[in-house]
Amino acid sequence: MTRPGKKRARAASGAPGGSRNDEPGEGGVEEAVTFIAEQVGALRKLAERHKLDVLHYLLGMTKLEADEHLRLRSKRKLS
């Protein structure tokens, strides 16, 4: 807990050497979707390893949605 009048320093998200444990979403939508895509990918592999077919499928759809969002967003940036 911080004392009144003192502010805690925040790490710049996306900065080189930044902590891997930074809260997702601090850097905006693109960072949040990238974080979600990475985590869902790992969860999907776990579901596959344990033969959790429905979870594997649903997490795959979530990963596709996140990847598509990133693809469309980067396409808009090029325009």
Image (spheres, helix red, strand yellow):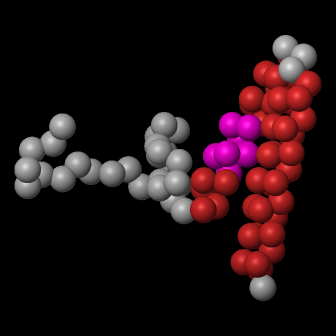
Work out whether residue 79 or residue 2 is closer to the camera in this orientation and state it: 2
Residue at the (60%, 53%) spot, across then down: 32
Residue beneath the point at 54% across and 62% down: 28
Q: How many marks?
A: 0
Task: Give coordinates of residue 4: x percent, y percent.
Answer: 8, 50
| Corner quadrant of residue 50 | top right
Residue positioned 47% across, 55% down in the render: 26
Tell me the quadrant of the picture where the C terminus can be found: bottom right
- Looking at the image, can residue 66 be seen? yes
Residue bounds of the magenta highlight: 34-40
Residue extending farthest to the front is 54
Q: Quadrant of the N terminus?
A: top left
* Residue sitting at x 15%, y 42%: 2
For this view, does 2 lie left or right of residue 37? left
Q: Quadrant of residue 51?
A: top right
Q: Position of residue 60 (x, y in %)?
A: 86, 40
Q: Is residue 13 magenta?
A: no
In the displayed structure, would residue 59 be above or below residue 35? above
Residue found at the far bottom of this picture = 79
- As drawn, 46 above or below 70: above
Res. 15 visible in picture: no
> In the image, is residue 36 part of the stretch drawn in magenta?
yes
Q: Residue furthest left?
A: 4
Secondary structure mostly taken by the magenta-highlighted segment of the chain: helix
x%, y% of residue 74?
76, 70
Which of the pair 16/1 is nearer the observer? Answer: 1
Residue 9: x and y in percent read: 27, 51
